[in-house]
Amino acid sequence: MPRKFLYSITTGRSGTVFLNALLKANIPNATVYHERVGFPHFGVTCPDASHSCGFNTVGNIAPVQQFWKRKLELDAECPSEYFVEISHFLAKAGLVENLGFLPEESEIHLVALKRDPFKIYWSYINRFDFFNSGFTWLFSLDSRYRNVIIDSTPFRKEGMFGNALWYVWEVFARMEYYRLLTENVPNIIFHQVSLENLVTPQGAAKFITSFLGEPPQQIQIPGKQNATKQEFFGDREKEAAKQLMKTLHCDPAALGAEFFHSGRRLGTPTHLKNQ
């Protein structure tokens, strides 16, 4: 059984492939996974649409808990000293709420991985990821979900551009919410890192040291990973996206903190009782 577990909380398009490669290169006695999708992973080691939709509509219901119990028990069977899964799918479907299914003696690390929010947003636009509900139900968050921190109403009016922007702000808000939710849990260590810092030897060494508890012998920095290779939109659309980001700007960390301190919880969404 692993002594330490590490999972990510992030949007995607934020450097998950780079972080995966960084940890693989610098922690030889670790089992490191990126996004485990497709057959046979959906519904087993990766939440499927029913788990994501259920959690983000009504909370940590029994079928969601059953998935996490099975998944985390499988993770705990890994023979390596360190178990790492860098995937943006997990935390959006109830990972943090169900970490109690890991063995009590486990040391659990959560890494909130950020990148320049406009770069994340623009990457999603160019990939057309928020063009239809198929992607949002399975891989991200649908702006029509009820169990969320940020009201998506003004964003939905802007179509694909607005939905993608809401998603970025919502996940950033959840990072702060989960930081507060876990700050008094003794065996959970919460890390906040940015891709821009991780790509430097100093930033990479600091993060890996905080996970291992000691400095790595040497740092290998991977090359650029999973970059967007083609842009389907030009300067006009890019400027429009920047303007929309200014128009619908918010402070996601403040909104996440406000949600937490109000007593509301994503796992037990009592704020939906009258809806």
Image (cartoon, rainbow, N blue to C red):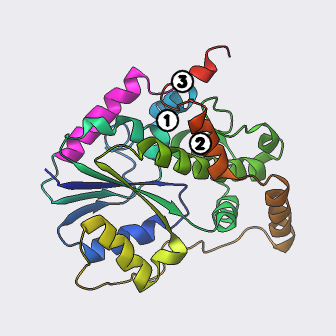
Q: Is residue 47 visible?
A: no
Q: Is residue 165 above or below residue 104?
A: below
Badge 2: how crowded within 10 Å, few (<14), some, or many (20+)?
many
Q: Quadrant of the C terminus?
A: top right
What is the magenta segment's predominant secondary structure? helix
| Residue at x 32% of width, y 27% of height | 66
Disc sitting over residue 58 in the figure: 3
Badge 3: how crowded within 10 Å, few (<14), some, or many (20+)?
some
Query: What amino acid is at disc 3?
Result: Val
Name the image quarter holding residue 151: top right
Q: Which residue is mark 1?
A: 52
Q: Are marks 3 and 2 in contact (CB under 8 Å)?
A: no
- Mark 1: secondary structure: helix
The stretch of residues the image draws in magenta is 59-76
Q: Work out which residue is located at the far top of the displayed protein and give it.
A: 274
Task: Give the spatial CA distance, label 1 vs label 3.
Answer: 10 Å
Q: Which residue is mark 2?
A: 141
**Which of labels 1 and 3 is toward the front?**
3
| 117 drawn magenta | no
| Residue at x 21% of width, y 60% of height | 82
